[in-house]
Image (cartoon, helix red, strand yellow):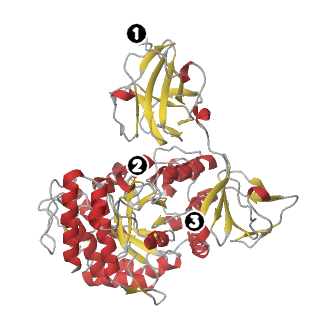
């Protein structure tokens, strides 16, 4: 009966999608209400508390030497398998995590004569052939069942990795005889919808998994996501298991999207419109970059940010629809490990205390984040890939200069594959403390966030639920800081208690003085919250986004001549309407005084860009790689990865201005909101 209903939904929704590609129609057929298939309220509430541990199966732990892919990108030959994960469940539980996410474990059948690069891709699982069997190099269906059952008994949800937008090409029909339709990468929708609905529900019904991480989710239309989500909800409500508390529960039915882009793109391709949900959760790549740029550097060695940078990123969650549930991670199998980023930025190495202090600061920010969080295996011990930090990703491994590439290193699991050193044990203990704190104080994972302080050296948030109020604070500098907080500004009428150390802070003349060492974080309980609550800051107005002078004028007429730069320049960036392409509406025109301008209707959001000709020669960027609306900045020559970052808090028309010397040397730039 369940499969018949799913088939009916798939056919009906596919017909609606084919007719007008409308999320409204998909919702009507799903029968939830006349507008949309809404996010399940129980799942949404529970997902706030998710503390997910991501496992790259092929490189994690070998529990059976007779199987495994036995390949890597360098000298490593990983043989990770399901038994290795089963053997590591006690370790994962000891960290205070309550969920695991496995990279794809379905069978990727080799093509005859394929090269070693294809073998490597098979090992990742992201180009599946048979979506309904376990890769025998990882284990068996029985081991998969054992893994899920043992994880559930330990209080761990289990999420599989769903690749619903592309495949290897030699796909095996489903048990019901379905196949994906169209090209291999991406597949066609709505024609492929029924196949992937069957995949998504099969593993919930067979193994009682708790949901899916969704690879390259932008490849699937948002209305198809609404249909797949409806099928996942239906399947999750059709089966039960007994959890670690002895309760009979349904699988959670959580789905989280990988969309590696900015807020606007994640909204457009993942979350969908307000009142018309496509997906309900997506990884918070934008804030992830702000965290690493504050406590380390990003993959292009850009960093040295502070608390204001973090607060600005968190405020941009307002761009998402109300159903959105961002999930914050520091890394994954495609991102450079935090430890390697510290070394890439010439900041600190594992033999220096600062390396470990910065790890703690970044992990503390995760612990204080409202919504689900995900740790990538190895982050809890400050793992890094020796010899990798300053090498070109693939060449490093191929040339034998490092063991592997990116973050696909063999797991160092205490007592199973490794014995940890003092620093690793200390960080692991700190992570366990953070996760326990997060579990015991829902204000961290569910609380309303109000920023109290955000400057170059300190970040302070107030977190509150109906039951409690907390302060989270972290140093973003190498120097000790003394913070003075007025009791009225944090809505406190009594003591503050440090939840990690137990230290008590009393107010003197209505002020608390709190000292932070370099990159130290504190979690403080407000013992007596005031009934008046917090006074929230007034948001920036349009006037603060407007500059002054010639470069801020939006109606400067175009003048004859090309000016000091011979080629047409463009504002080229990660705008939703451009995607790093040179668009005609983003072309600069010469307006005299050695100045070029482009007036563009922009969405609110955070963007990265350069100012370049179509052949990328020349290209320019801001000195310091950051631009503030309404403020003049210094223009300099750019290059790969040297992107200007700007946040436009309001949608509207903006003028982008570049000024050069008579000889064509870069001088100034500005972006200003038009009246």
On screen, residue 501 versus residue 316, left or right, reads: right
Question: In the drawing, what numbered circle is on residue 367?
Answer: 3
Count of numbered tags:
3
**Which quadrant of the figure contains the C terminus?**
top right
User: How much space separates mark 2 and mark 1, taking CA atoms?
Assistant: 38 Å
User: How much space separates mark 2 and mark 3, taking CA atoms?
Assistant: 23 Å
Helix, strand or loop status at disc 3: helix
**Badge 3: few (under 14), some or many (20 or more) residues near its Cα, within 10 Å?**
many
On screen, residue 318 versus residue 577, left or right, reads: right
Query: Would you name the residue on which mark 1 appears?
Result: 561
On screen, residue 584 versus residue 534, left or right, reads: left
**Badge 2: few (under 14), some or many (20 or more) residues near its Cα, within 10 Å?**
some
Tell me what residue is drawn at x 39 percent, y 29 percent.
Answer: 586
Residue 162 at least partly seen: no
Q: Residue furthest bottom?
A: 246
Mark 2–mark 1 CB contact (< 8 Å): no
Question: In the drawing, what numbered circle is on residue 261?
Answer: 2
Helix, strand or loop status at disc 2: loop
Residue 178, position as x, y percentages in the image: 14, 68
Quadrant of the rendered structure where residue 214 is? bottom left
Circle nearer the N terminus (1, 3): 3
Tell me what residue is drawn at x 25 percent, y 80 percent.
Answer: 140
- Nearest to the observer: residue 499 or residue 91: 499
Residue 460, position as x, y percentages in the image: 67, 56
């Amino acid at each position: 009966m369940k499969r018949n209903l799913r088939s009916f939904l798939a056919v009906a929704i596919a017909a609606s999608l084919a007719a007008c590609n409308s999320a409204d129609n998909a919702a009507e057929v799903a029968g939830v209400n006349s507008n949309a298939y809404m996010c399940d309220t129980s799942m949404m509430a529970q997902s706030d508390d998710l503390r997910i541990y991501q496992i790259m199966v092929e490189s994690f732990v070998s529990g059976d030497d007779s199987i495994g892919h036995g390949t890597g990108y360098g000298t490593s030959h990983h043989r990770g398998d399901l038994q290795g994960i089963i053997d590591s469940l006690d370790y994962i539980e000891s960290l205070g995590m309550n969920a695991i996410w496995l990279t794809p474990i379905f069978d990727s059948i080799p093509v005859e004569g394929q090269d070693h690069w294809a073998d490597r891709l098979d090992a990742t699982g992201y180009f599946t052939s048979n979506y309904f069997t376990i890769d025998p190099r990882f284990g068996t269906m029985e081991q998969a069942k054992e893994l899920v059952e043992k994880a559930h008994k330990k209080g761990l949800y289990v999420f599989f990795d769903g690749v619903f937008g592309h495949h290897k090409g030699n796909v095996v029909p489903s048990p019901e005889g379905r196949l994906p339709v169209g090209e291999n990468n991406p597949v066609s929708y709505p024609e492929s919808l029924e196949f992937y609905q069957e995949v998504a529900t099969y593993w919930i019904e067979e193994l009682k998994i708790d949901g899916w991480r969704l690879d390259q989710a932008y490849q699937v239309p948002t209305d198809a996501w609404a249909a797949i989500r409806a099928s996942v909800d239906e399947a999750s409500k059709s089966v039960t298991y007994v959890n670690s508390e002895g309760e009979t529960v349904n699988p959670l039915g959580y789905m989280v999207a990988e969309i590696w882009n900015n807020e606007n793109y994640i909204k457009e391709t993942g979350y969908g419109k307000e009142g018309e949900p496509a997906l309900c959760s997506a990884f918070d790549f934008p804030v992830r970059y702000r965290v690493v740029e504050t406590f380390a550097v990003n993959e292009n060695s850009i960093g040295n940010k502070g608390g204001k940078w973090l607060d600005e990123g968190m405020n941009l969650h307002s761009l998402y629809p109300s159903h959105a549930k961002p999930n914050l991670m520091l890394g994954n199998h495609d991102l450079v490990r935090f430890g390697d980023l510290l070394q890439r930025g010439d900041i600190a190495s594992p033999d220096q205390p600062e390396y470990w202090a910065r790890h703690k600061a970044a992990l503390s920010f995760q612990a204080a984040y409202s919504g689900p969080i995900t740790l990538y295996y190895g982050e809890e011990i400050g793992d890094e890939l020796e010899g990798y930090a300053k090498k070109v990703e693939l060449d490093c491994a191929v040339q034998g200069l490092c063991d592997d590439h990116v973050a696909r290193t063999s797991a160092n699991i205490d007592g199973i594959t490794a014995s940890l050193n003092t620093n690793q044990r200390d960080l692991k203990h700190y992570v366990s403390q953070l996760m326990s704190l997060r579990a015991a104080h829902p204000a961290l994972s569910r609380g309303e966030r109000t920023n109290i302080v955000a400057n170059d050296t300190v970040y302070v948030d107030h977190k509150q639920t109906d039951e409690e109020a907390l302060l989270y604070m972290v140093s973003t500098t190498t120097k000790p800081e003394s913070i003075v907080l007025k009791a009225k500004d944090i809505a406190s009428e009594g003591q503050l208690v440090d939840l990690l150390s137990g230290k008590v802070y009393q107010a003197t003349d209505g002020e608390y003085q709190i000292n932070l060492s370099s990159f130290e974080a504190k979690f403080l309980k407000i013992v007596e919250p005031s009934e008046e609550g917090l006074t929230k800051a007034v948001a920036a107005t349009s006037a603060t986004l407007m500059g002054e002078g010639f470069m801020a004028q939006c109606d400067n007429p175009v003048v004859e001549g090309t000016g000091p730069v011979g080629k047409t320049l463009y504002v080229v960036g990660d705008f939703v309407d451009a995607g790093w392409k040179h668009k005609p509406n983003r072309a600069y025109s010469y307006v005299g005084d050695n100045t070029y301008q482009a007036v563009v209707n922009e969405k609110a959001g955070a963007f990265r860009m350069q100012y370049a000709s179509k052949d990328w020669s020349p290209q320019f960027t801001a000195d310091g790689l950051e631009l503030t609306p309404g403020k003049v900045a210094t223009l300099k020559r750019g290059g790969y990865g040297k992107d200007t970052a700007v946040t436009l808090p309001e949608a509207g028309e903006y003028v982008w201005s570049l000024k050069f010397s008579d000889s064509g040397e870069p001088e100034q730039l500005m972006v200003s909101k038009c009246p």
